[in-house]
Image (cartoon, helix red, strand yellow):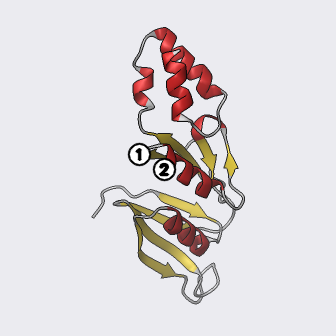
Amino acid sequence: MQKITPCLWFNGRVQEALEFYTSVFKDSRVKGVTRYPKGSPMPEGEYMTAVFEIQGQEFMLLNGGSTIPFTWAVSFVVNCADQGETDYYWDRLTANGGSEEQCGWVKDKFGLSWQVVPAGLDRLYTGTAEQTERVMQAMMKMKKLDLGMLEAAFHG
């Protein structure tokens, strides 16, 4: 059993969110669903919780009712192997009402924040002060991170 499981509060749409996240992330699986019983604050049979896993990380979705929106204060980082994988997750997480944000951040159609990060970005911040400043300046102009352009900035 996982010690800590992020629980994401939704106003309805738990079933839709479960289907979305398990379709975006290839190595994912549904672990369980509970439904509201008769006499509860939500319609009988509606999803109450859903537990799923993405690459071994467990998440819970909760249909808590009333709107409590997601904020930038919590995001999930998607560490991508290469630019192709960066493009894949960027495109899927912004699809159908998601939004592209600055510096590799996206909000999905539910308003949940993700950081889509290509492998190798961290090493571009270990160079000289001039190199890291060039990388930062280049990144500040980007929405989706382009590792090739960031590497070019690093090398001047």
Q: Is residue 117 above or below residue 67?
A: above
Image spot of residue 57 (x, y percent): 37, 58
Task: Identify residue for label 1.
Answer: 81
Q: Front-most of 72 and 78?
A: 78
Dot 2 amino acid type: Glu
Dot 1 amino acid type: Ala
Circle on res. 85: 2
Classify 10 Å Cα crowding around label 2: few (below 14), some (14-19), many (20 and above): some
Q: Residue furthest left?
A: 1
Q: Residue 88's quadrant in the figure?
A: bottom right
Image spot of residue 140 (x, y percent): 63, 26
At a point 49% along the width and 14% down the height, the residue shown is 131
In the picture, the quarter occupied by the N terminus is bottom left
Count all numbered tags in the image, as a single digit.
2
At a point 68% along the width and 65% down the height, the residue shown is 66
Q: Residue 38's quadrant in the figure?
A: bottom right
Q: Secondary structure at mark 2?
A: helix
Q: Residue furthest right?
A: 97
Q: Are marks 2 and 1 in contact (CB under 8 Å)?
A: yes
Q: Secondary structure at mark 1?
A: loop
